[in-house]
Amino acid sequence: NAALPDLVVVGAGLFGLTVAQQAAENGHTVEIIDVRKHIGGNAYSYTDEETGAEIHQYGAHLFHTSNKRVWDYVNRFTEFTDYQHRVYATHDGEVFPMPINLGTINQFFHAHYTPAQAQELIKEQAGELAGTDPENLNDKGIQLIGRPLYEAFIKNYTGKQWQTDPAELPASIIKRLPVRFNYDNHYFKDTWEGLPKDGYTAWMERMIDDPKIHVTLDTDFFDESQPFNKAALVGRVPIVYTGPVDRYFDYSLGDLKWRTVDFKEQRYDEDNHFGCPVMNFVDADVPYTRAIEFKNFNPERSEQQNPDRTVVWEEYSRSAGRDDEPYYPINTSDDQKLYQEYKNLAAQEPQVVFGGRLGTYAYYDMHQVINSALIAYEKQVGPLLHK
Ligand code: FAD
Ligand code: UDP
């Protein structure tokens, strides 16, 4: 059919944009649709007029990777600043460095342990879990840092973030954070890190700056009144679908569980309210998990920022309904079973490739999404496209 592009991509997030970019580079025409009014998916950002801060509309996004292929790929479209992520946590009226490192441990115990002494202490406090490799977040947390630190820094924050018994949550959630027996307080353990020099949106616009790629926004794949809809296209043209996998199948097997985040904005008549980009609130008496002060992500832009005002977003996590933005897959063992069933259905869809955080029900960071999109293009999407 002459009217159809070679490929339709549902979702202009980093998965969809990467696949579209690869297809265009290989000579194919692509139509990208997104239900939102902008490209970029959850990595979208915009400049706040009053403060000059770059606001990450769907929560703070920090780019980091140890994957050389991904790092080289993203550097084709943007330069990165030398930003390195560091986080602080307020607990019991005191501010501690996060993730847990020797500084956190010594401040918490009012001590001056050496690395070896601190390791010995944590081993003791981990009790019978020391040296094991538990599969759930609760036991893994205690095994990594011992019970007192777990109860101070992890238990309540995790309770606010997930509202799910930590014994039901996968250990992979807590393994995201390093634990260090030295004073290194970098949040990430990856080789490369930084923020896109002129913002996330400029980066992502450049990825699809190609006449073979056309974007239609404000368009829902399930809306049959518009031409790029599921009923009209499946089986007729290769499709990459990056929306929620359960939504695609009309929730026929049940709903996969997600957490969403509500952001509450605060503005202060100050240059800098927290003195750092992210302050976690790890106690139960503060209802939000963390506060993001966006100006502090881009100190190199201080000339363009307002020295008299700052903007902060507090994050309130809650369980997501079908009409909420699905942000964090809860991934209990029941969810994982249900996802396997959807995955089996997805495998039978003719010429449809499911990808990304929503399409594969995965807690992926941006670099993982880009990596999986490059692989999906090579292994699944490319072979469906004929010259
Ligand atoms: P998305 O970005 O979600 O894109 C999917 C797109 O599909 C959306 O634009 C959506 O509108 C569209 N869509 C869905 N359904 C339909 C439909 N029916 N019709 C049309 N379009 C549809 N990663 C990091 O590396 N570092 C971080 O610091 C970081 N922080 C994060 C903080 C939060 C709060 C969240 C939620 C995520 C964070 N991430 C972070 C993860 C990052 O956002 C994702 O890895 C990445 O953006 C996912 O890209 P994606 O293309 O898979 O999905
Ligand atoms: N976490 C915690 N206390 C903190 C920071 C993180 O308990 O101060 C736990 C919590 O369970 C969280 C997980 O570690 O969900 C991963 O944290 P990360 O900052 O990587 O989460 P994200 O940035 O994806 O929200």
Image (cartoon, rainbow, N blue to C red):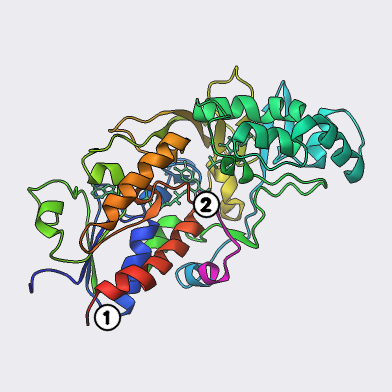
Q: Is residue 188 above or below residue 125?
A: below
> Separation of disc 1 and disc 2 at Cα?
40 Å
Residue 212: x percent and y percent? 24, 74
Q: Secondary structure at mark 2?
A: helix
Residue 99: x percent and y percent? 69, 41
Choose the circle earlier in sequence order: 1 or 2.
1
Label 2, residues with CA under 10 Å away: few <14, some 14-19, many ≥20: few
Question: What segment is highlighted magenta in the picture?
Answer: 61-71
Front position in the image: 354 or 198? 354
Q: Is mark 1 within 8 Å of ligand 1?
A: no
Residue 348: x percent and y percent? 24, 57
Q: What quarter of the picture does the N terminus occupy?
A: bottom left
Residue sitting farthest toward the bottom: 387
Q: Amino acid at mark 1?
A: Gly
Q: Which residue is mark 1?
A: 27
Front position in the image: 4 or 166? 166
Q: What quarter of the picture does the C terminus occupy?
A: bottom left
Front position in the image: 84 or 236? 236
Residue 296: x percent and y percent? 59, 45
In the displayed structure, does residue 97 sit left or right of residue 340? right
Residue 181 in magenta? no
Question: Foreground mark, 1 or 2?
Answer: 1
Residue 15 visible in the picture: yes
Q: Residue at x 40, y 41 (%)?
A: 337
What label does residue 304 carry, if any?
A: 2
Q: Is residue 33 above or below residue 313?
A: below
Q: Residue at x 74, y 46 (%)?
A: 185
| Quarter residue 39 falls in | bottom left
Q: Residue at x 43, y 41 (%)?
A: 336
Q: Is mark 2 within 8 Å of ligand 1?
A: no
